Image: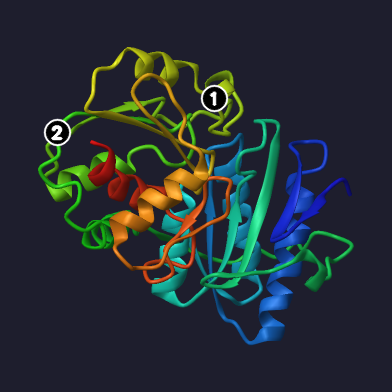
Amino acid sequence: MELYSTQDGFLGEIAKGFTFAHQARVAAGFGARLEAEGIRRVVVAHDTRFLAKEMAEEAAGILGGMGLETFLLKGPSPLPLFGFALKELEAAGFYLTASRKPARFQGVKLRLGPGKPLSPEGMALPQEAPQKRGSFQVLDRKKAYLEHLAQNAGQGAQGKKGVVYLDTLGGAGGGVLPGVFKLLGLEAELRELHPLPHPLFYGVDPDPKPENLPTLLVLMKAVEPPAVGFALDGDADRLSVVLPGGEVMPPDRVLKALEEALKGKEVQGDGQGRYLFPWYLPEPDPFLAALLLMGKLL
């Protein structure tokens, strides 16, 4: 089986290593681990990659067939929404994504609970994919997540004017920031780039490095301040920040700006664009980071 272990799941090339049959074995092995832990509830979610929805439905059916109370998040879901659902339901999680890898890859991130990644070393996979399928419930928690995000965004972005570009690269983060802008009544003009789900990520890798952001960089080089540009990776847990003139802010400067915006509240950065707010969610959230940064950069 050409699946590769990651820190919190598996990764493989679609149709070569990451197939329906191999994913079914992973889901069954994960379900068995949940049973051994006495965990009875699990949330399944997916990104925008090729056949991600169908694979998520298959995984949910397998987990439901094992007698677990299984929920499938509606539509492509960014990682923060997935983390929110796990926290809200006190559930384990099975999230289909290859994050910032090229479009030919797919993977899965495993959670024993909110903020509790599971290493593949702690799982035994069955030799054959199980045949039994059970029921699952489709779950829509986007509105609840947006409300939670708005409640924790503070007042820094209120009253700020200017242009905010957001390049979601066709990944799972499309449509989130417009929703929270509306809830908060923000005055800045939001311009989303590549917001619709796209399994090929509009021809680039879903990694918000400069080489994958040609449109955003051209726009930010031409824009007049006040303005700021943001970009997300495929599962929307990483954030890149671009200033007028096209300068990409290094992660350490982004972290420092977040610390200043939070005035004592904790934020953790991994140096690769992920920013975790432990008092808010057990997963990194680039949308909260963007809203906080607007207060400092506009």
State which quadrant residue 253 falls in: top left
Q: Is residue 182 left or right of residue 33?
A: left
Element at label 2: loop
Residue 183: percent from left, percent from top? 16, 50
- At x 67% / y 85%, what residue is drawn? 37
Task: Return the mark for residue 161.
Answer: 2
Element at label 1: helix
Depth check: give the residue in front, 49 or 283.
Answer: 283
Give the CA separation, mark 1 to mark 2. Answer: 26 Å
Residue designated by label 1: 210
- At x 47% / y 54%, what residue is drawn? 275
Depth check: give the residue in front, 281 or 269.
Answer: 269
Residue 273: percent from left, percent from top? 52, 45
Residue 181: percent from left, percent from top? 20, 43
Q: Which three-letter amino acid code belongs to the residue tagged 1?
A: Pro
User: Residue 140: in sight, yes or no?
Assistant: no
